[in-house]
Image (spheres, rainbow, N blue to C red):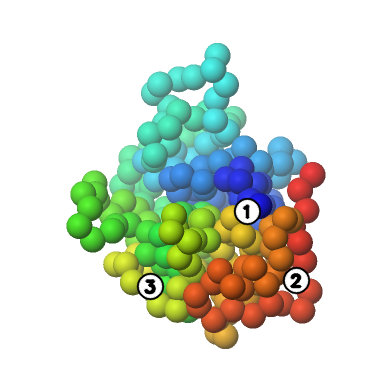
Amino acid sequence: MPLTREQIAQRIAAEVQDGYTVNLGIGIPTLVANYIPTTKSVMLQSENGLLGMGPFPTDDNVDADLINAGKQTITTMPGASFFSSADSFAMIRGGHVDLTVLGAMEVDEVGSIANWMVPGKMIKGMGGAMDLVAGAKNVIVAMQHTDKEGNSKLRIKCTLPLTGVKCIKKIVSDFGVIEITDKGFVLLEYAPDMTAEQVVKATEGKITIHPECKAMVFA
C-alpha cells in the first residue's frame, strides 16, 4: 500500500533541520508541522504574515483569528510574530526561508514543477508558490505519485503550466522518496508495502534506483 498523507508528512519532517525557517504549502505540507520534534528549534513561516506557527489546535484550543495561508486554524509558538503579507513576501524573496514544502500536480525529471493551475478550471490565482520556488533555499515536494487514473505525475516533461523551472531537489510521494539530479529521478526510499521496481514502473520520467535504496521505516 502507498503511504498515507500523514506518513508523507512524517517523512518530510525528518528533512527539517534544527534552526530552519520553513514555509509549508497548502494540503499535505501543512501536516508536517505536527511531526517536527520539539527538540528542534524550527520557525514555521506562513505567507499570510506569521512567523512561529505551531501545530494544528485541538478542538478546545481553536482561535478563529489564527489561520495559515490555506485558511486552516493553527496555533502559535512562544516568540511568534505577525506582520503584513508584504513583509512576508520580502522574507521569501530575500532568501530567508531555508526550506519550503509544496504540493504539486506534476514534477518533471529536471526538477520543474507545475502546481498552480489546470487549464480550463477556475482558480483564485497563482498564490505564493512562484515566489517560494524562486526564493527558498531548498524545495521539497509532497505529492501523490499518480493521478486518479493511475497516470504518473513524475513526468519526462511537465504538461501543465509551470510554477518554476529546475527548482525541485527532492520529492516525497506516497510511493517513496525521490531525489532529482542531473541524470533524472533517483529513488532513495520506497513505501514499506511496495517494491523499488513498482515505483520505477509507476514513474514516467527517467528514474534510477540508488545503490543504497531501502524501504521506509516508521516508528
Residue 51 pos. (x, y %) = 49, 40
Q: Is tag 1's residue or tag 3's residue first in the polypeptide sequence?
A: 1
Q: Is tag 1's residue or tag 2's residue first in the polypeptide sequence?
A: 1
Q: Give the numbered dot on residue 67.
A: none
The three-letter code of the residue at mark 2 reads Cys
Residue 77 pos. (x, y %) = 58, 31
The three-letter code of the residue at mark 3 reads Cys
Residue at (66% x, 43% y) in the render = 36
Q: Which residue lies furthest to the front in this view?
A: 149
The three-letter code of the residue at mark 1 reads Pro
Up the image or down, 186 lies above or below 129; here it is below
Up the image or down, 206 lies above or below 80; here it is below
Residue at (44% x, 55% y) in the render = 148
Up the image or down, 174 lies above or below 163; here it is above
Residue holding disc 2: 213
Residue holding disc 3: 158
Q: Residue furthest bottom?
A: 183
Q: Quadrant of the C terminus?
A: top right
Residue 181 pos. (x, y %) = 58, 79
Up the image or down, 180 lies above or below 127; here it is below
Q: What element carries label 2?
A: strand
